[in-house]
């Protein structure tokens, strides 16, 4: 059961990876043009550092995620708790494409690494998304955008904070806190020693290259 847990996290990362690949490919934002001729709102770029607590719902499986986004240091952390689980899963992603998925405590601490073609999401990753209009989401008046039929993303009209996003798979995030400028101390970004002495596993689990293979693993 740790392995299925790990798999679902790695799937989440692949979703983000595919988004990035699509963003890099740079499709023109034609769908974002307003019928009235007025220009549509554009999504607010992510702050370069923030901490967010996310309430996740993936067809009824609930999780809390501590998300630490740290663009200047090229790293992104998802610390994940399944509902009522005693242990946490750490999903640490570096901008050089290396990701570590590990547990720290419990009977069997584990670690898996993956090497992806691209790094973490850029602050402007939503650029070029199609505007979905304005509506209430989770009780907040929001502007929404859709990126590449892959994710729908909603931000608060007034504060510009993200409120909610939903992947096409149905996996949804509700943003519970959003602390701009919050940064996790350096020492916490160190993957445990057992992540570095598993050469064979590491090589076996290297992710296939390219966006095609990423989407095939969804
Ligand atoms: C989680 O999502 C499912 C639909 O996939 C929904 O039926 C359920 O009410 C949601 N649970 C919570 C706690 O939001
Ligand atoms: C990427 O950076 C991390 C953190 O510095 C490091 O542990 C990892 O070995 C690097 N990966 C590559 C492929 O250089």
Image (cartoon, helix red, strand yellow):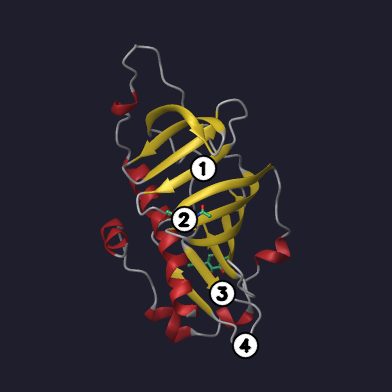
Which comes before the other along the chain, label 3 or label 4?
3
Q: Tell me if mark 3 has few (under 14), some (14-19) or many (20+) residues whose alpha carbon lies within 10 angstroms of its own.
A: many
What residue appears at the point 47 percent right and 44 percent down from the top-left corner?
A: 165
Q: Identify the residue position indicated by label 4 in the image.
A: 107
Q: Choose top left, top right, bottom left or bottom right for residue 102.
A: bottom right
Mark linked to residue 119: 2
Residue toward you, 3 or 26: 3
Q: Identify the residue position indicated by label 3 in the image.
A: 102
Which comes before the other along the chain, label 1 or label 2?
2
- How much space separates mark 4 and mark 1, taking CA atoms? 35 Å
Mark linked to residue 164: 1
Of helix, strand and loop, which one carries label 3? strand
Whether residue 74 can be seen here? no
What residue appears at the point 49 percent right and 36 percent down from the top-left corner?
A: 154
Residue toward you, 96 or 29: 29
158 relative to 5 in the view: left or right: right
Of helix, strand and loop, which one carries label 4? loop
Residue toward you, 218 or 136: 136
- How much space separates mark 3 and mark 2, taking CA atoms? 19 Å
Q: Quadrant of the C terminus?
A: bottom left
- How much space separates mark 1 and mark 2, taking CA atoms? 23 Å
- Mark 3 and mark 2 in contact? Answer it, CB < 8 Å: no
78 relative to 218 in the view: left or right: right
Which comes before the other along the chain, label 3 or label 2?
3
Percent across and percent down for residue 205 are 39, 77
What is the total number of numbered labels drawn onto the structure image? 4
């Amino acid at each position: 059961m740790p392995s299925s847990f790990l798999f679902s996290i790695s799937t989440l990362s692949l979703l983000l990876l595919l988004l990035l690949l699509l963003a890099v490919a740079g499709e023109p934002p034609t769908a974002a043009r307003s019928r009235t001729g007025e220009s549509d709102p554009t999504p607010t770029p992510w702050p370069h550092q923030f901490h967010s607590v996310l309430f996740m719902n993936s067809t009824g499986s609930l999780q809390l995620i501590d998300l630490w986004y740290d663009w200047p240091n090229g790293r992104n952390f998802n610390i994940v708790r399944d509902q009522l689980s005693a242990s946490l899963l750490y999903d640490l992603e570096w901008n050089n494409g290396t990701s570590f998925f590990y547990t720290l405590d419990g009977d069997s601490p584990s670690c898996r690494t993956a090497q992806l073609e691209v790094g973490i999401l850029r602050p402007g990753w939503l650029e070029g998304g199609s505007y979905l209009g304005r509506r209430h989401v989770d009780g907040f008046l929001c502007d929404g955008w859709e990126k590449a039929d892959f994710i729908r993303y909603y931000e608060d009209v007034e504060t510009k904070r993200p409120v909610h996003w939903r992947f096409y798979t149905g996996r949804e995030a509700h943003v519970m806190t959003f602390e701009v400028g919050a940064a996790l101390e350096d020492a916490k970004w160190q993957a445990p020693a057992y992540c570095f002495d598993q050469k064979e596993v590491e090589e076996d689990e290297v992710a296939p290259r390219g966006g095609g293979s990423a989407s095939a693993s969804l």
